[in-house]
Every structure is written in C-alpha cells, then in structure tokens.
Amino acid sequence: MDTLTKYLAVAGGGALGAMLRYYISLSGLSRTAALFPTATFVINITGSFIIGFFLTLVTERIPINPHLRLAVAVGFVGAYTTFSTFEYETARLVEGKDFLYAFLYVVLSFTVGFAAVWLGIVTAREVEHVPVTSHGAYERFEDQVRVNDLAQGDGTDRDLQIADDQKAGVDSTRGPER
C-alpha cells in the first residue's frame, strides 16, 4: 500500500507541476522574445530554485512526510521543469541557424539555473539560520534514511531477486534443490 501512496504522491505533484508549466508557457513570456524561448527558460530557472530551496529545507532543517517530499521534488518539479523541451528548442535554434540564440540559451540556462539552485540552497539555510556551507546535516539525513528505509538496507539485492523469482513462479527462498 505504501508503494501505491508514493506513486499517487508523485502523480498529484506532477499534475500540479504540469499545469503550472502549461499556464506559464501560454503566458506573455512565450511572446516576449519570439526567437528566444523565454517561458521555458523562466520555468527551468524557477524550477532550479524551487528544488534547491525545498530539498535543502527538508533535508537539513524541516522533517516532512516522505510522501510530500516525493510529491514536490519528484512530481511537481519533475513535471514543471522542462529539460527535454530545452533540448528540443536548442536543436530547433541550431537547425534554424540561430547559433547566437542557441549558445545564449544553453549557457544562460546552465549558469543561471545553477545560480538559482545555489540561491535556493543559500536562501533555505538563511531562513533556518544554518551556515551556508553546511552539508553535514544533509549527510546525516542520508545516513538516517538508509538505516530506516528497508528498501536501502542490507540484503536489498537478495530481496529484489526473491521478488523477481516469485513473479516468475520460482521459489528461491528454499535454497538449491538436492
């Protein structure tokens, strides 16, 4: 049942992210610079900020339900950001021989997107009054997750093999036949 809940959390977050992405793509941003894909650029930059801010807060300072974490980080941001669209639009710019715009789009998306992720991390730490360079809390969180998450514990590979064997109708829990 927990697996279904996780999928539903991702689906719910994804639906909201996809709707917001569609709304922004229809906004005036798509018409501000006809040759430059401004709406997609803004979506990728704000998505970069959101994931940097959100994941920093929830991994370092604010414990939240893992399903909500999935809904926002995987569902919402995953559906909201548009990397595949970014790649396609870059290819179309190159194909149309708009090399300057293609170059600017790639370089600006990468550099400003990275800056937005970093700004999200710094802002989240500032809001929670944590030193900007604090990565130890994140590592402690990851260690705690591994200990508490059975899917990441010792024997996971064995458990996955047993599950696969059961689907195939093989009983691998009895050991080799004699």
Image: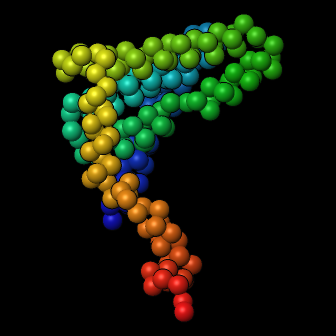
* Residue placed furthest toward the left: 129
Q: Nearer the viewer, residue 19 or 154?
A: 154
User: Percent from the top left, x then y, of residue 11?
Assistant: 42, 49
User: Percent from the top left, x then y, of residue 123?
Assistant: 29, 16
Q: The N terminus is located in which quarter?
A: bottom left
> Which residue is at 34% across, 31% downward?
55
User: Percent from the top left, x then y, of residue 19?
Assistant: 46, 36
Question: Total of numbered circles in the picture?
Answer: 0
Hey, which quadrant is residue 124 in on the image? top left
Q: Nearer the viewer, residue 86 or 157?
A: 157
> Which residue is at 31% across, 34% downward?
139
Q: Is residue 20 left or right of residue 26?
A: left
Q: Is residue 167 above or below residue 46?
A: below
> Which residue is at 28% across, 28% downward?
136
Q: Is residue 146 above or below residue 49?
A: below
Q: Is residue 111 visible?
A: yes
* Residue placed furthest toward the bottom: 178
Q: Is residue 67 visible?
A: no
User: Percent from the top left, x then y, of residue 56?
Assistant: 31, 28
> Which residue is at 81% across, 13% downward?
97
Q: Name the image colouring.
A: rainbow
* Residue placed furthest toward the top: 100
Q: The C terminus is located in which quarter?
A: bottom right
Q: Is residue 72 above or below residue 66?
A: above
Q: Is residue 131 left or right of residue 142?
A: left
